[in-house]
Image: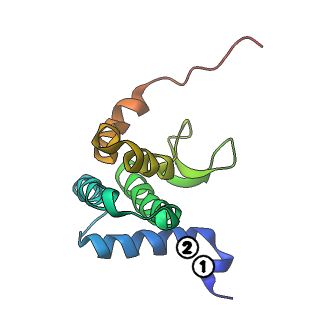
Amino acid sequence: MSTTENNPLAALHQAAEAVRQQLQVNAFDAAAVQHLADFIEAQRPTLKPDDRQGVITALGCFLGECMVQTFGGQWAAGPDGSTGVGIGGQHFFNPFYRIDQQLTHGLQESVAAFFASVPNRMEEKVQRKSWI
């Protein structure tokens, strides 16, 4: 068994690094996310349905790692068991969902626009329901 089979975090980092190299960007930052959004737009018309889930997984790892390194987040499991990025102990974002949204809807669901909105989203208070 390889270390990535034993350590899901290592697999996430490895996938993110592979995408970083493919995109030819130097860091996991806002500029890299803009390259990612452009890359998704270039791939959308030719992406085969059989390849879609693999693309979402790989690109989601990259987007998530950009969030981890830029906003001080960490890879975590969400309340529904999904994998995503937790930030500040109160916010959870699913980068795979964001990739899927741009693949499906185009630039109106741009990962770059989402990424730019994260600081504002983190300022919002998480509303807890006080009723049952």
Tell me which residue sits at (68%, 41%) in the image: 79
In the picture, the quarter occupied by the C terminus is top right
Q: Residue at x 26, y 52 (%)?
A: 30
Residue 23, position in %: x, y? 27, 70
Instruction: Give residue 11's mark.
Output: 2
86 vs 104, left or right, is: right
**Figure disc tally:** 2
Amino acid type shown at disc 2: Ala
Which one is in front, 60 or 125?
60
How many residues crowd mark 1 within 10 Å: few (<14), some (14–19), many (20+)?
few
Dots 2, 1 in contact, CB < 8 A: yes
Q: CA distance from mark 2 to mark 1?
A: 5 Å
Label 1: which secondary element? helix
Return the residue found at the far top. Answer: 131
Neighbourhood count class around disc 2 (C-alpha, 10 Å): few under 14, some 14–19, many 20 upward = some
Q: Is residue 64 left or right of residue 117?
A: right
Q: Residue at x 55, y 73 (%)?
A: 11
Query: What secondary structure is marked by label 2?
Result: helix
Residue 86, given in percent of the width and then of the height, sits at 53, 46
* Residue for badge 1: 4
Residue type, numbered disc 1: Thr
